[in-house]
Image (cartoon, grey):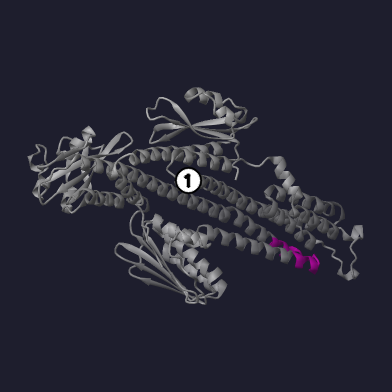
């Protein structure tokens, strides 16, 4: 799975050796022989009456090799085939045709249709190329991620990760250096593709690094720092012998993987430090796994507080977060405390949390009321004792983990402080992971938004440019048919066939444009668009459809309408392609806070997997896309189906701004 683009010579060689190339050549030769059969006399015709005198059919047939070459071999091959086809047709137009004007028009029409076919193939080819690059990048990152998450022993983890990195990129050699605990020197932790004797040299640290990077196996190399939270962890050096220029996309991929390795290295170091502690640290490691298993930020905070209470036997707890812009501390997460405390906002010189956030040091109070900066609202609700530890991300304190007793005063031991400090450290990692997860979801939203914008642009161009050109061509053919009084009937028949073909292509372009992004969705809203979608399904596939509205119809945000439309579109496509259904019912329900769409059919159904991640392995990519869209909109997707009992898909989306979902997205999936 090399990231670099194939060389032009290898691409040409592949095209020449492809059976499709020979098939195109055969089609062109056959077309030429048929087109000039009367001149070369190599094709035996059963009767002179059957000989084609106008040669319109042969010209139209030349579209076949053009389209086949464009879609099978690429747009360049399509252009070459178009040029060859034009060269085949021109001699008859110029020298042999008794009606050169008609022949010229037909040749021009064939050229335009062929060019349009090549353009459509080029669009498809570009989409496939972009999708393939994105897929290759994700596969490479996932391959390395699988290794990094498979072990917490640094040398083994980094050695396997380096091997997998070289495998997916096609590079020959690599080194991973890690900073020592003091951050003063580099330690060679993993290497591949270098002589063992040279690596086993007596040299160490920076001297060894300088010596190894001069090895011929790394004649062409790139060095990338390993960082985690902007702190250096080491360096990744990869390359190959000879002269090689790293393409930008490969460097971008290496930087992404290096970031993962840096984070994994820091996590491994934290794990080693935890492993050296006493029994409480072993328990802390088990707890950390439970905390980091959750990626929704609000759920992470709630779980952190509850686990911390269990570990030290506290009665209540809270998470305090620092708002740097306003220099205040708020309590977004409370457990076993009145919800009105979430409205408390403290300055940095108020409360025990203010002291901990300011100093970055844990603090414990046996008698909370006796603390000079005690918060009156907490005293009012029965707080007796308190233990507060900082939540640190990198070297920055951005909040605190607060634990309280409500029944009696208690002295928190150093062991309690150490345990909760460990929980807070793991909580910081969990919060960072949750924020990264939110960033990933935000990135996915941006990709979907860009995809929809590109679909809208392509649909508009197809409608405004290609479709209009085809309509003009069709009208020209109509005018030609009406004015060609002296043209033989056989020629009129050929012109009529060409006009019908142009009309079919026009309809295809319009359908393709509508499938990309129906303008009705933006102009009229969700319900009229769904009505058009179901009507098309009924007319084209003979499926009985029913569209039902529950609640008061109203326009919702364009993002929500688009999400529901795409889900409905995919569900109805599944009905058309796979379900063998004869009846489908679509319900749209407007609630006070949500809007839902239910699509039920009486088709053959299927066995729904227990977990949503199994949909991909089952080949249910359409359902996977529907689920992801619903989750990104903060909603849920429910699929109910059994073999021979039909399928029901229910999508429910909250009525709120799509871009304002900052607290995580819904993860509900039921069967």
Q: Which quadrant would the C terminus be assigned to in this image?
A: bottom left
Q: Nearer the viewer, residue 452 or 1?
A: 1
Q: Residue at x 18, y 48 (%)?
A: 343
Q: Is residue 100 magenta?
A: no
Query: Looking at the picture, how far across and down is residue 532, in whole percent?
Result: 49, 67
**Mark 1 surroundings within 10 Å by alpha-carbon count, few (fewer than 14), some (14 through 19), many (20 or more):** some
Q: Which quadrant would the N terminus be assigned to in this image?
A: top right
Q: Residue at x 76, y 68 (%)?
A: 493
Query: Looking at the picture, how far across and down is residue 409, in whole percent?
Result: 10, 46
The answer to whether residue 99 is visible is no
Query: Looking at the picture, how far across and down is residue 390, in whole percent?
Result: 24, 39
Q: Is residue 145 above or below residue 492?
A: above
Farthest-out residue, left:
370
Q: Nearer the viewer, residue 67 or 625?
A: 625
Tag count: 1
Within the image, what quadrant is residue 350 found in? top left
Position of 507 with respect to 499 (left or right) is: left
Q: Residue at x 64, y 58 (%)?
A: 470
The boundaries of the magenta stretch are 477-494
Most frequent secondary structure within the magenta stretch: helix
Q: Is residue 487 magenta?
A: yes
Q: Which residue is mark 1?
A: 145
Q: Residue at x 26, y 37 (%)?
A: 325
Farthest-out residue, right:
41
Q: Is residue 59 above or below residue 139?
A: below
Position of 146 with respect to 322 (left or right) is: right
């Amino acid at each position: 799975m090399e990231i670099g683009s194939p060389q032009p010579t290898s691409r040409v060689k592949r095209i020449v050796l492809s059976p499709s190339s020979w098939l195109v050549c055969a089609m062109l030769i056959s077309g030429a022989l048929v087109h000039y059969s009367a001149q070369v006399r190599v094709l035996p015709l059963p009767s002179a009456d059957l000989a084609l005198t106008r040669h319109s059919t042969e010209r139209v047939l030349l579209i076949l090799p053009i389209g086949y070459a464009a879609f099978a071999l690429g747009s360049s091959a399509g252009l070459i085939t178009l040029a060859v086809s034009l060269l085949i047709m021109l001699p008859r137009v110029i020298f042999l045709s008794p009606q050169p004007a008609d022949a010229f028009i037909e040749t021009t029409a064939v050229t335009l249709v062929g060019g349009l076919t090549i353009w459509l193939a080029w669009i498809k080819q570009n989409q496939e190329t972009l999708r393939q690059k994105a897929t290759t990048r994700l596969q490479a990152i996932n391959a390395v991620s699988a290794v990094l998450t498979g072990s917490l022993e640094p040398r083994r983890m980094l050695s396997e990760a380096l091997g997998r990195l070289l495998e997916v990129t096609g590079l020959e050699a690599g080194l991973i250096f890690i900073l020592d605990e003091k951050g003063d020197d580099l330690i060679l932790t993993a290497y591949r593709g270098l002589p063992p004797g040279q690596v086993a040299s007596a040299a160490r640290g920076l001297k060894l690094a300088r010596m190894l990077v001069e090895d011929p196996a790394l004649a062409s190399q790139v060095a990338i720092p390993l960082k985690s939270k902007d702190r250096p962890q080491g360096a990744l050096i990869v390359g190959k012998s000879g002269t090689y220029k790293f393409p930008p996309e490969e460097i971008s991929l290496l930087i992404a993987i290096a970031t993962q390795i840096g984070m994994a290295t820091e996590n491994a170091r934290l794990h080693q430090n935890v492993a050296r502690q006493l029994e409480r640290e072993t328990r802390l490691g088990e707890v950390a796994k439970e905390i980091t298993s959750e990626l929704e930020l609000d759920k992470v905070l709630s779980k952190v507080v509850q686990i911390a209470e269990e570990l030290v036997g506290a009665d209540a707890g809270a998470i305090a977060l620092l708002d740097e812009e306003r220099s205040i501390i708020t309590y977004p997460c409370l457990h076993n405390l009145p919800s009105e405390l979430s409205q408390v906002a403290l300055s940095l010189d108020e409360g025990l949390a203010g002291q901990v956030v300011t100093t970055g040091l844990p603090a414990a109070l046996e008698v909370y009321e006796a603390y000079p900066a005690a918060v009156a609202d907490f005293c009012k609700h029965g707080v007796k004792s308190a233990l507060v530890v900082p939540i640190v991300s990198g070297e920055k304190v951005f909040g605190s983990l607060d634990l309280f007793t409500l029944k009696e005063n208690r002295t928190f031991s150093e062991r309690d402080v150490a345990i909760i400090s460990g929980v807070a450290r793991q909580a910081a990692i969990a919060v960072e992971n949750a924020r990264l997860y939110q960033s990933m979801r935000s990135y996915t939203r941006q990709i979907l938004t860009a995809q929809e914008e590109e679909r809208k642009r392509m649909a508009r161009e197809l409608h405004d440019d290609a479709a209009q050109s085809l309509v003009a061509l069709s009208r020209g053919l109509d005018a030609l048919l009406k004015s060609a009084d002296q043209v033989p009937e056989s020629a009129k028949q050929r012109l009529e066939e060409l006009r019908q073909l142009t009309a079919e292509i026009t309809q295809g372009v319009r359908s393709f444009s509508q499938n990309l992004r129906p303008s009705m969705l933006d102009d009229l809203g969700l319900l009229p668009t769904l009505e058009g979608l179901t009507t098309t399904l009924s007319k084209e596939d003979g499926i009985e459809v029913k569209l039902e509205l529950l609640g008061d119809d109203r326009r919702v945000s364009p993002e929500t309408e688009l999400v529901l439309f795409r889900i409905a579109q995919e569900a109805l496509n599944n009905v058309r392609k796979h379900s063998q259904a004869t009846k489908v019912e679509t319900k749209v329900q407007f609630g006070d806070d949500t809007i839902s769409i239910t699509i039920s059919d009486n088709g053959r159904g299927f066995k729904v997997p227990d977990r949503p991640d199994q949909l991909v392995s089952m080949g249910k990519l359409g359902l996977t896309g529907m689920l992801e869209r619903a989750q990104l909109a903060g909603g849920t997707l429910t699929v109910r189906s059994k073999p021979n009992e039909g399928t029901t898909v229910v999508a429910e989306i909250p009525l709120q701004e799509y871009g304002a979902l900052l607290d995580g997205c819904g993860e509900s999936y039921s069967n």
